[in-house]
Image (cartoon, grey):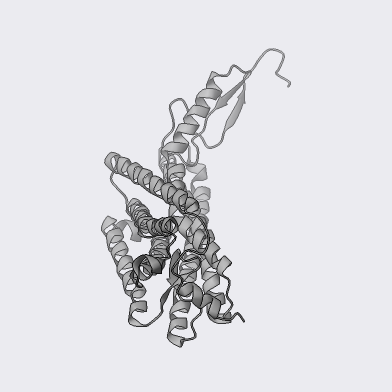
Amino acid sequence: MASHPKNYSCHGRLNVSYGSPTTSAIMFSAGVLGNVVALILLEIRRRKQTASLFQVLVTSLIITDLLGTFSVSPLVITAYLRNESLLGMSGNRSVCEHFGYAMTFFSLVTLAILLSMAVERWLSIGHPYFYEKRLTKRCGYIAVTLIYLVGVLFCVTPFLGFGKYVQHCPGTWCFIDMDLDEREHKVFNIIYASCLLAMIVCTVLCNASVIYHLLLMYRRHKANWSSTRGHRKHRSITKEVEHLVLLGFMTVAFVICSLPLVIQVYIHTIFNLESHKKDLIALLLLSANPIIDPWVFIILSPPVPRLLWDKMCKNLKSKPTQEKFICVQPPLCQSSPPGCPQVVNLLKVYTEIPGTADS
C-alpha cells in the first residue's frame, strides 16, 4: 500500500514538476480543427437534407467535444508556459475545481450521448414501428438536455462535500481525489466509475444488437434486390451500415480512451494503490477522445467514401483490359457514383475474345 505524503505534495504543488506544453498544444489544435471541420460538414448536410434524430445527436456530441476541449486545454498550456500549477495560477482552488468539474462532466456527458446514439440505432433497426411513430428530432433535443442536466447535478456534488476535486501531478490537471479515506468520497468515485462502465457495456450491447438485426435484414431482402422495393431496402440497409460504422468507431475510441481511467479509479478507491504515471496516461487518453471523435466523423462521413469510390471506378473504366469490370455501390455510399451501376457484388465479366474461350 502506497503512502499518502507524496500524493498530498502533488495536491498542494504550486509549480509544474515536469513536462512541456508541446503535446498539449498539438492536441488542442487538432481538437479545435477537427471539431470545427466536423460542424461545417454537418451544417452543409443539414442544408441539403432535413436533419435526422441521429444527426442531432452527432451534432450534440461534436459540440460537447469542442466545449470540453476549450474548457481544459488552454489551462494546461498556460500552466506549462508560466510554470505554475493550476493552484499556483489562481492562488485558490477555483481553477483546479473548474478543471476537475470539466473533466468529470464532459467524460460523463460524452459517453451518455454516445449511448443515446446507440439506443437510437437499436430502436431504428429493432423496433422500426415504435421509432417511426414516437421518436423525432425533438426527442433528441430533450435527451441531450436531460443528459446535460443530470451531468451538472452529479458533478456539482463534490462542491457539497460528496466527493472532492484535487490537483494531480505534475500540477497541470485536476480530477476527483482517488486516495481519500472518507466513505462518502469513495462512494462518489465508485458511482462515477460504475456509471462510465455501465454506459460502455450498454453501448457495446446496443451496437451488437444492431449488427445482428442488420444481418437479418440482409438475409431477408437478399432475394428481392432485383426488384424496386428490394433496391429501396438495400439503400435503407446501406444507410444503417453508415451510421453503425460511424457509431462503432466512436464507441471503440471512447472505450480505449476512458476505460484506463475507470480502471485507475477502481484501483485507487478499492485497493488504495497509487501510480501518478498511470494516472497521467489515463488522463491523456481521456483528453484524446474529443480529438478523435470529430476526425472519425470527418473520415467516415459519406461524401468521402463516395469520392474515393468514384475515382476508383473511373480509373477502372479508363484502363484498357481484356476484362470488363462493373463497379458496385460500396457499403458506405447512399447513391451510386456516375458510371457505377449498383449491384450486389463486384462482378468480373469476361468478354468473349477469339482464342480465350477456354481460358
Q: Nearer the viewer, residue 86 or 27?
A: 86
Q: Nearer the viewer, residue 161 or 331?
A: 161
Q: Nearer the viewer, residue 234 or 14?
A: 14
Residue 89, quarter of the rendered image: bottom left
| Image quadrant containing the N terminus | bottom right
> Image check: 130 left or right of 261?
left
Q: Taking the image as drawn, is residue 345 in sight?
A: yes
Residue 189 % position (x, y): 46, 77
Residue for point 40% across, 61% down = 110
| Image quadrant containing the C terminus | top right
Residue 263 % position (x, y): 55, 70
Residue 167, quarter of the rendered image: bottom left
Residue 337 % position (x, y): 44, 30
Q: Residue furthest top?
A: 354
Residue for point 37% across, 53% down = 62
Q: Taking the image as drawn, is residue 135 in sight?
A: no
Q: Give the vertical position of 226 relative to 13 (above or below).
A: above
Residue 123 % position (x, y): 40, 60
